[in-house]
Amino acid sequence: MEKTEWVHCPVCGNKTRLQMREDTELKNFPLYCPKCKQESLIEAKDL
Ligand SMILES: [Zn+2]
């Protein structure tokens, strides 16, 4: 079974609707936070 984790907003720490697998790779992904109402660029290694 693959391990998945919810991605948290780097600004406020709110849980977003984006799920990430253990082997997911992201670079400069515009993560939208419903709490901040804005997008933050994230990288998978930051999580
Ligand atoms: Zn946020």
Image (spheres, rainbow, N blue to C red):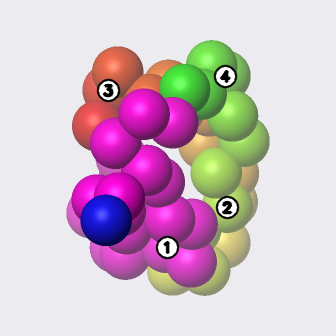
* Circle nearer the N terminus (1, 2): 1
| Badge 2: residue crowd in 10 Å (few <14, some 14–19, many ≥20) | some
Real-space Cα separation, disc 4 to disc 1, in angstroms: 16 Å
Q: What is the three-letter code of the residue carrying label 2?
A: Tyr
* Circle nearer the N terminus (4, 3): 4
* Badge 1 residue CB within 8 Å of ligand 1: yes
Q: Which residue lies under the disc numbered 3? A: 46
Residue in the image at 42% along x and 33% along y: 23
- Assess whether mark 2 and mark 1 are in contact (beta carbons under 8 angstroms): yes
Q: What is the three-letter code of the residue carrying label 3?
A: Asp
Real-space Cα separation, disc 3 to disc 1, in angstroms: 15 Å
| Above-or-below relation of 36 to 44 | below
Q: Which residue lies under the disc numbered 1? A: 16
Percent from the top left, x then y, of residue 21? 43, 50
- Is 30 or 22 nearer to us in this picture? 22
Percent from the top left, x then y, of residue 18? 57, 66
Quick one: SS at disc 4?
loop
Q: What is the three-letter code of the residue carrying label 1?
A: Thr
Percent from the top left, x then y, of residue 9? 41, 57
Residue in the image at 64% along x and 51% along y: 31
Instruction: Return the mark for residue 32.
Output: 2
Q: Is residue 1 left or right of residue 41?
A: left
Q: Which residue lies under the disc numbered 4? A: 28
Residue range corresponding to the magenta coloring: 2-24
